[in-house]
Image: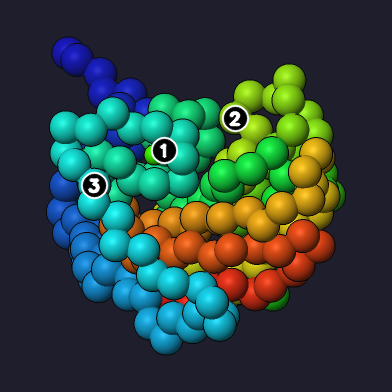
Amino acid sequence: MSRVHAPSIFAALLLLGCASKPPPPLAPPPEPQPPPVVEETELHAGVTPFAFDCAPDAAEECNALDDNCDGTIDEGCGYESGGVQITVSWDTGADIDLYVLDPSGEQVFYNEEARRTAVGGFLDHAARGQCRPEQPITNVENAFWPDPTPKGDYVVELHYFGPCGDVIETHVTVSVSVHGKIAGVYRYALQPEERVEAVAFQVR
Ligand SMILES: [Ca+2]
Ligand SMILES: [Ca+2]
């Protein structure tokens, strides 16, 4: 005569209970979000949109331009892109600094304690022109924000910190990429010691 142990009956009942229980409803898939859009771009007097002519077969250079039209600025140069990427370059040995006020209300810039903001902004490449000629890529600064793109206001400020040699006007290029697309390319002739809110835009 076979014996049935109490734990076996318990296990069988448990299995039966599980089998008769309807599976929990699946969570609905997340609603697809519309891609972010850039609105209300404002340019400081003297800042001009630059119709840069990219080419898909071009080599990507470290120049604050999306040479190969893939929507990412300067990939391969050692700094990052993301939900938002803002890159500046300039054409002299001057020390030019990029400041960006972002939707958190904080500003990223070169200072070690100001390189990150609450919404993930990060100035990951600072440069000092010919003041630090030993530095790699001396005339590009780059900041990026992660995906999903933080929504809100961005203000791009440029500062001619020091000439590092000849005190001369410096032509600065600013490129903005949002969610993998170039949102704008701008140029401005920055004067020695000038500090200017060059470009402002909203991401919605
Ligand atoms: Ca590119
Ligand atoms: Ca480039």
Give the number of marks. 3
- Residue type beneath disc 1: Asp
Question: In the rendered view, would you say 76 is above or below 157?
Answer: above
Q: Is residue 193 left or right of residue 190?
A: right
Occupied quadrant, residue 22: bottom left
Q: Which residue lies at the image location 22% right of the left edge and 68% below the top edge?
A: 32
Q: Earlier in the sequence, mark 2 or mark 1?
A: 1
Q: Which residue is mark 3?
A: 54
Q: Nearer the viewer, residue 70 or 103?
A: 70
- Residue type beneath disc 2: Ile
Q: Tell me the quadrant of the picture where the N terminus can be found.
A: top left
Q: Secondary structure at mark 1?
A: loop
Q: Nearer the viewer, residue 102 or 17?
A: 102
Q: Earlier in the sequence, mark 1 or mark 3?
A: 3
Q: Earlier in the sequence, mark 2 or mark 3?
A: 3
Label 2 neighbourhood size at 10 Å, few (<14), some (14-19), many (20+)? Answer: some
Q: Which residue lies at the image location 30% right of the left edge and 55% below the top edge?
A: 52
Label 3 neighbourhood size at 10 Å, few (<14), some (14-19), many (20+)? Answer: some
Question: In the rendered view, would you say 156 is above or below 113?
Answer: below
Q: Which residue is mark 2?
A: 137
Q: Secondary structure at mark 3?
A: loop
Q: Position of residue 67 (x, y in %)?
A: 30, 41
**Direction bottom: furthest residue:** 40
Q: Which residue is mark 1?
A: 74
Q: Nearer the viewer, residue 45 or 176?
A: 45
Q: Is residue 74 left or right of residue 158?
A: left
Q: Which residue lies at the image location 16% right of the left edge and 32% below the top edge?
A: 57
Q: Assess mark 2: CB under 8 A from ligand 2?
A: no
Q: Secondary structure at mark 2?
A: loop
Q: Assess mark 1: CB under 8 A from ligand 2?
A: yes
- Label 2 – label 3 distance at C-alpha: 21 Å
